[in-house]
């Protein structure tokens, strides 16, 4: 598989009754995530503030760098997968002494760094389009930090998106969708739904499906997600990740 196939995340997801499906899904909440055990300390709060300050300090330059990489690789998107993975590793090194494993699963541990694989809505000319997307979530006990290094390509700001939430807040999904167009749908569940021929109006994600023409692409995204979920860097991301890590190390 060529590198552009691995890091270009602008293949579209087509749905039937899309808005209905989204509205129905938001009712279910955010995977019922509950705060990890442990009381927030002054050090925890300082860590969150330090991460925020660091992200703000590199926000514009990081976004420019991933845009430049995309142009150099002749990609139609900013490589949300490897860009998010690189930023997750940078955060791990700078703020957690590389003690965490960047993966794709939240395991209810006090401190975690997760790369999420979901969807994003954006304007493509005069049409509203939905495509696959990746971002970073950092968990510090009962706080969730949302960090999206490539959302600016869709006209949502000029740099890295940063939001802090209370873990378990039922409004997280609505805020991310309204403010950034990010749809916190699990690619793994959606792909399995299509592969198992589950009717479109049934769970998971009633009203949502994948255009059969793009199913193989989404299967590859699913494979990337699975590689990250076991704590490994996907093949083909090495150059992209290395460039970003070396600059922001």
Image (cartoon, rainbow, N blue to C red):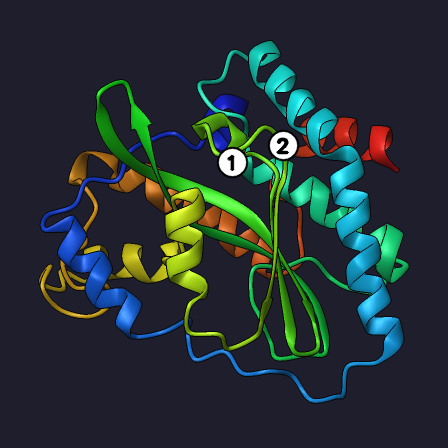
Q: Is 204 situated above or below 215?
A: below
Kindly state the secondary structure of the residue where label 2 is placed.
loop
- Does 57 appear above or below 96? above
Density class for disc 1 (Cα within 10 Å; few <14, some 14-19, many ≥20) is many
Q: Residue at x 66, y 52 (%)?
A: 232
Give the residue drawn at x 64%, y 18%: 69
Give the percent coordinates (x, y) of residue 39: 76, 87
Q: Which residue position holds label 2?
A: 159
Where is residue 46, by image quadrant?
Answer: bottom right
* Occupied quadrant, residue 221: top left
Which of the two residues, 48 or 74, is positioned nearer the viewer here? 48
Measured along the vertical axis of the image, is residue 198 above or below residue 53?
below
Q: Is residue 53 visible?
A: yes
Residue 70 picture location, percent across and down: 57, 18
The crowd level at tag 2 (other Cα within 10 Å; few <14, some 14-19, many 20+) is many
190 left or right of 59? left
**Separation of marks 2 and 1 at Cα, in angstroms:** 8 Å
Q: Which residue is mark 1?
A: 151
Residue 82 screen position, x and y as percent = 61, 37
Task: Please say if 24 is above or below 218.
Answer: below
Viewed as shown, does residue 120 lie left or right of 150?
left
In the image, what residue occupies the spot 54% across and 26% down?
78
Closest to the observer: 179 or 20? 179
The percent position of residue 238, horizontal first and vertical second, equals 70, 32
Which of the numbered marks, if any, corresponds to residue 79? Answer: none
- First along the sequence among labels 2 and 1: 1
Q: Residue at the spot x=52%, y=54% of the render?
A: 116
Which quadrant holds the C terminus? top right
Q: How many marks?
A: 2
Q: Helix, strand, or loop for circle 1?
A: helix
| Left or right side of 88 for 51 | right
């Amino acid at each position: 598989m060529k590198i552009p196939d691995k890091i270009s995340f602008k293949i579209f997801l087509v749905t039937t009754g899309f808005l209905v499906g989204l509205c129905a899904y938001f009712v279910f909440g955010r995977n019922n995530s509950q705060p990890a055990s442990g009381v927030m300390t002054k050090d925890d709060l300082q860590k969150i503030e330090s991460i925020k300050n660091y992200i703000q300090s590199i926000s514009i330059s990081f976004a420019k760098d991933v845009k430049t990489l995309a142009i150099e690789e002749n990609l139609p998107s900013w490589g949300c997968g490897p860009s998010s993975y690189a930023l997750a590793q940078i955060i791990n090194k700078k703020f957690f002494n590389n003690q965490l494993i960047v993966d794709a699963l939240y395991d209810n541990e006090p401190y975690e760094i997760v790369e999420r694989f979901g969807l994003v809505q954006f304007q493509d000319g005069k049409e509203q389009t939905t495509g696959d997307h990746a971002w970073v979530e950092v968990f510090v006990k009962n706080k969730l930090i949302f960090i999206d290094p490539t959302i600016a390509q869709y006209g949502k700001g000029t740099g890295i998106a940063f939001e802090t939430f209370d873990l378990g807040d039922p409004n997280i999904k609505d805020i991310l969708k309204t403010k950034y167009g990010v749809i916190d749908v699990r690619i793994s569940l959606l792909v399995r739904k299509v592969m198992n021929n589950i009717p479109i109006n049934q769970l998971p994600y009633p009203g949502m499906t994948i255009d059969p023409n793009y199913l193989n692409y989404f299967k590859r995204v699913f494979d990337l997600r699975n590689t990250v979920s076991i704590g490994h860097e996907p093949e083909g991301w090495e150059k992209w990740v290395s460039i970003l890590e070396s600059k922001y190390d």
